[in-house]
Amino acid sequence: VLIVLLGPPGAGKGTQSQLLAQSLGVPKVATGDIFREAIARETPLGVQAKPYLDRGELVPGPITTEMVKSRLQREDCRKGAILDGYPRTVEQARQFDAVLRDIHRGLSKVINIDVPDDELLRRLSGRWTCRKCQSTFHEIFKPSKNVGACDRCGGTLYQRPDDSIEVAQTRLRVYRTRTEPVIAYYQEQGVLVHVDGQQTPDSVLSDILSRVQVVAPS
Ligand SMILES: [Zn+2]
């Protein structure tokens, strides 16, 4: 099984890739982890990628693709992998196709986790942090007992700039422009599956599993 997980920020991609990896017994391959490891081990690609990450910029597609390629060729990916955060652009999707031909692998499915924008904004922007002890709360998913006050220490809650509605809107906009064409790209290849992301994590997982699992003959 080789699965690509797509979905906007806040759709629960991180959680699902973790759960899927566990259920299918294959590793989760996330570009963020690959970058961190390559940089820590000072591999040639890690050395190339580091300045971009240090500046907070996107690592160029070819470097990212090479890293994903060598990651997929490692022993633990022999039975497959769950890709999270890659490919992010149509350019990367094309490069990834070339890699797959190169290493004689094929995509099982591309899963797109659908969540409407208003729900994503609620999820992404409802987070509040305690000024004193840094505990975090969420307006909907984990509200504090007293509005504006920390449950643990009584400190004042504030919203980090990253958790503001404006930043959330920008992240969604960037995602829609850059990654939605990737969805169309895989749709054309006939490997795309849509899953409703407005369910509990367990239901989302079983939806995905029912769409990807090849039933082994008993
Ligand atoms: Zn606190």
Image (cartoon, rainbow, N blue to C red):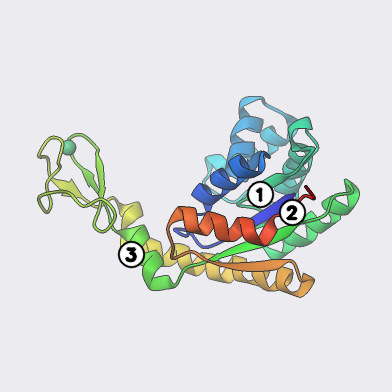
In this rendering, would 115 be left or right of 29?
A: left
User: Callout 1 environment at 10 Å: few (<14), some (14 to 19), or many (20+)?
Assistant: many
Residue 6: in sight, yes or no? no
Q: In this figure, which residue is indicated by the disc labeled 2?
A: 215
Q: What distance separates the C-alpha of mark 2 from that of mark 3? A: 37 Å
How far across and how far down the image is residue 42, in percent?
Answer: 67, 26
Mark 3–mark 1 contact, CB under 8 Å? no
Q: Earlier in the sequence, mark 2 or mark 3?
A: 3
Question: Of helix, strand and loop, which one carries label 1?
Answer: strand
Q: Which mark is residue 122?
A: 3
Q: Amino acid at mark 2?
A: Val
Q: Is residue 23 above or below residue 123?
A: above
Query: Is 52 on the left or on the right of 92, as rendered?
Result: left
Residue 79 vs residue 5, the one in the foreground = 79
* Element marked by disc 3: helix
Name the residue: 36% across, 66% down.
121
Q: Earlier in the sequence, mark 3 or mark 1?
A: 1
User: Amino acid type of disc 1?
Assistant: Leu
Residue 140 rendering spot, x and y as whole percentages: 26, 59
Q: Residue at x 69, y 53 (%)?
A: 3
Distance, label 3 to label 1, CA atoms, is 26 Å
In percent of width and height, residue 120 lies at 40, 65
Q: CA distance from mark 1 to mark 2?
A: 21 Å
Q: Which residue is mark 1?
A: 83
Disc 2 crowd, CA 10 A, few/some/many (<14, 14-19, 20+)? few
Name the spot of residue 29 as percent of width and height, x first. Answer: 65, 42
